[in-house]
Image (cartoon, rainbow, N blue to C red):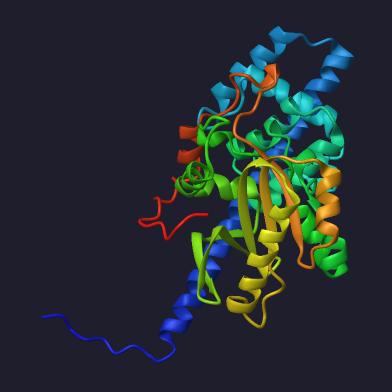
Amino acid sequence: MTQLIFLPPDYAAWLAELKSRIAGTQLRAALAVNAELIRLYWEIGRGIRERQQTHAWGSKVIDTLGRDLRSAFPEMKGFSPTNLKYMRRFSEECPALSFGQQPADQLPWFHIVVLLTRLSNSEERAWYAARAIEHGWSRNVLGMQIETRARQREGNAVTNFPARLPAGQSDFAQQALKDPYLLDFLGLSREANERDIEQGLTRHITRFLLELGAGFAFVGRQVHIEVAQDDFFIDLLFYHLKLRCYVVVELKTGDFRPEDAGQLSFYLTAVDRQMKAEHDNATIGLLLCRKQNRLVAEYALSAIGQPIGIAEYQLTQAIPSEFEGSLPTIEQLEAELQGDLPPKNKDVGEN
């Protein structure tokens, strides 16, 4: 018979505190170990570079060094000749042990290798390093963000945010949108209709959230709203955790038309009146279309009272030749991100 144990009233709270402290200590220890390893690699790289300059070390000496280090430290990985050459390059191209304002020792080693080998511009390296640290990108995700030109696309959507949102929120909201959005992971042709795209985005919601960027949380697809006893359905509804507002996403398979902005404006008004809580900020709209004329989009948004952004999407993407063969497959990405959410069981309607 199990003996009952009567625990002190503060036991559960103290246990929770201990778990939190232990987890925090483990994280700090792991980060400290990584930082020491990165500094060690930088020092090794600097030593190799200095000896190549003063003693004309060649590749055979580096091969020998790699074998000797692996023999002395068989439990450690990372002393291959190729990796030693990366260390040398690391010390040469990051003399301050940093990518801009981002200390390199906050990144895992193979993130650093990706930044060194796939980017030549120091400003771009600093931008991607900062985002990788901020959002906790895996190596595969970092590589994918580089290959899909995330920096060039961020903040590029046509919006009326400066005129419709407070200054600080306007800048943040602008950076939260891209142009174009790359939906090639859906595997659809240019002839796909809106329903096909919606269903694909729901099936691959994890991948779509990654493409949208940090802060987006999925609320639903074909979200029903009722106005004056008429039924309407929002294509995709999200909540942005940092902007603290709902984001209505509408899909159009054709070119942008000014009346599309009016329809989206109607949905934003409905969400603001029926769903927005007191602490939420004004709902933002994102219209994704196959093609847009930016001047026409600017004209259309100037007359709209709600904050709306307009961006193009691409169902297929031409991969630059230098990246062919280096992109992870969709299956690899899904495994990396621990799988997609299952499709919703029911559709409440469509436009």
Rendered location of residue 46, percent (x, y)? 81, 28
Asked if residue 295 shows in the view, the reply is yes
Viewer-proximal residue, 187 or 19?
187
Residue 296 percent location from the top left of the image: 83, 46
Q: Is residue 110 above or below residue 31?
A: above
The number of callouts visible is: 0
**In the drawing, does residue 94 fall left or right of residue 115?**
right
Q: Residue at x 67, y 80 (%)?
A: 279
Q: Position of residue 290 (x, y in %)?
A: 66, 39
Quick one: 111 or 254, which is closer to the camera? Answer: 254
In the displayed orientation, state which residue is furthest to the left. Answer: 1
Going 81% across and 54% down the picture, which residue do you hit? 300
Q: Nearer the viewer, residue 284 or 78?
A: 284
Location of the N terminus (image quadrant): bottom left
Nearer to the camera, 36 or 301: 301
Percent across and percent down for residue 276 are 62, 76
Name the image quarter holding residue 247. bottom right
Q: Please give left or right for residue 197 compared with residue 48 in the image.
A: left
Residue at x 58%, y 33% (from the top left corner): 184
Name the side, left or right, on which 55 lies relative to 272: right
Above or below, 321 against 106 in this view is above
Q: Residue at x 87, y 65 (%)?
A: 163
Let me know if residue 33 appears in the view: no
